[in-house]
Image: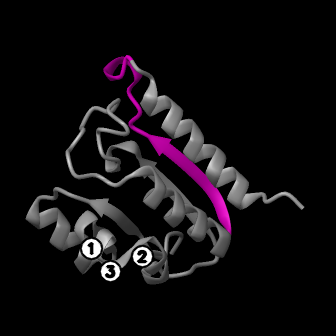
Amino acid sequence: PFVKHITSVGIRTARRKPYQESQEDGNLVITTKRFRQLGPRSVVDLIPQGENLYIIFDIDVMNPSEAPGTGTPEIGGLGYQEIRECLVELVSRDNLVGFDLVEVAPPYDSSEITVQLASQLIIDILAARFPSK
């Protein structure tokens, strides 16, 4: 199969049936609560290594106090530092072949803090993927 494993990190709200079906399909779901219990590095240890890594990062995993510019803000999201630590560790460990950052909605954030945070995460990912020599 083309995709061998899917891991969802930072889930706060999920309807029971899709959540159960995802797990039945062999996907790993790490809730925000579990993420905080384990910490970023331990979360990375749970994510199976594969030949290649493709990340789709949905900005609404972030706490709206740090990233309000999204269509589905929800209190209790993850913070920049813990997300950064997790992503950098993951990218340093695995062969990142692609990265999408989605759901940034500038019209919902007149302060532009969400765009700044998204830009910084992209820089963090690229710096981890292509470290200076």
Going by the numbered disc 1, the residue's amino acid type is Arg
**Residue 93 appears left or right of 65:** right
Disc 2 crowd rating (10 Å Cα; few below 14, some 14-19, many 20+) is some
**Residue 90 appears left or right of 77:** right
**The label number, if any, that marks residue 26 in the structure image:** 3
Q: Which residue is mark 2?
A: 43
- When the figure is inspected, residue 10 is found, relative to residue 110, above or below; the finding is below
**The label number, if any, that marks residue 16 in the structure image:** none
**Residue 45 appears left or right of 12:** right
CA distance for labels 2 and 1: 9 Å
For mark 2, give the secondary structure.
helix
Image location of residue 86, percent across then percent down: 50, 66
Task: Give the mark nearer the N terminus: 3 vs 1.
Answer: 3
Q: Which residue is mark 1?
A: 34
- When the figure is inspected, residue 110 is found, relative to residue 92, above or below; the finding is above
Where on the picture, by quarter, is residue 51?
bottom right
Are circles 3 and 2 on residues that touch, CB within 8 Å? no
**Residue 123 appears left or right of 22:** right
92 part of magenta stretch: no
Are circles 2 and 1 on residues that touch, CB within 8 Å? yes
Mark 3 vs mark 2: in front = 2
